[in-house]
Amino acid sequence: MYFWIIVALAVTVADQISKVFISSNFSATDHVVFIPGLMDIVYVKNTGAAFSILREHTWLLGIISVLFCVGIAVYMLKKKPKDRMLIMCAGLLLGGALGNGIDRIVRGFVVDFFEVTLFKFPVFNVADIAITVGAAMLAVYLIATDKRNSDEKSSINSGE
């Protein structure tokens, strides 16, 4: 029933543990090969959001994170959706927003550490992965639900 909370807590805990490990064991000049030719580990203090937008507005991003988390919780508690994919999406999005929100409020910046070396891409963290996967899954869910609803409406209108 509250699986979304378990997912959110698991993501938040994994995210925060990874960030404590990185910030305790790496300096800004450290650069460690993680997956040769694909990904390295670096320690970046990000005061912005994705692609460093709203840099130096951590307080605003912290407020947005809190409002987003409250919005997801209110939706899930009121609507009580039964669809497993939607529940998973909510858990991933909530956990990612909590992980980065905690950083913004407590540290004043988000700890990022995964750096793609195969091509140019912003440095990211576990919370970012959860948000990206959750958002992609939500898009697929919405498209599939819309298609299913359209198909049902078509069959009703054609008298099948």
Image: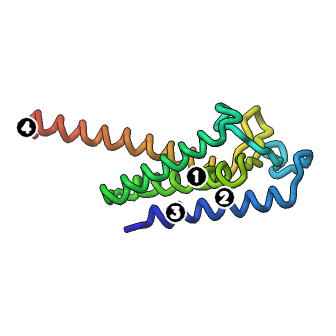
Question: What residue is at 50 percent from the left and 67 percent from the top?
Answer: 6
> Residue 25, position in %: x, y?
86, 60
State how the image is colored.
rainbow
Tell me the mark number nearer the camera, choosing from 1 and 3.
1
Please name the amino acid that badge 4 sits on: Gly
Q: Are marks 2 and 1 in contact (CB under 8 Å)?
A: yes
With respect to residue 63, does 50 lie above or below?
above
Marking on residue 15: 2
Please name the amino acid that badge 3 sits on: Val
User: Going by the image, does 66 lie left or right of 106?
Assistant: left
Secondary structure, mark 4, is loop
User: Going by the image, does 126 lie left or right of 45?
Assistant: left
In space, the residues marked 4 and 1 are separated at their CA atoms by: 45 Å
| 2 or 1: tag closer to the N-terminus | 2
> Residue 139, position in %: x, y?
44, 40
Please name the amino acid that badge 1 sits on: Gly
In space, the residues marked 2 and 1 are separated at their CA atoms by: 8 Å
Instruction: Determine which residue is flagged by label 1.
Output: 96
Please name the amino acid that badge 2 sits on: Asp
Instruction: Determine which residue is flagged by label 4.
Output: 159
With respect to residue 157, does 128 lie above or below?
below
Secondary structure, mark 3, is helix
Tell me the mark number nearer the camera, choosing from 3 and 4.
3
Marking on residue 7: 3
Secondary structure, mark 2, is helix
| 4 or 2: tag closer to the N-terminus | 2
With respect to residue 106, does 1 lie above or below?
below
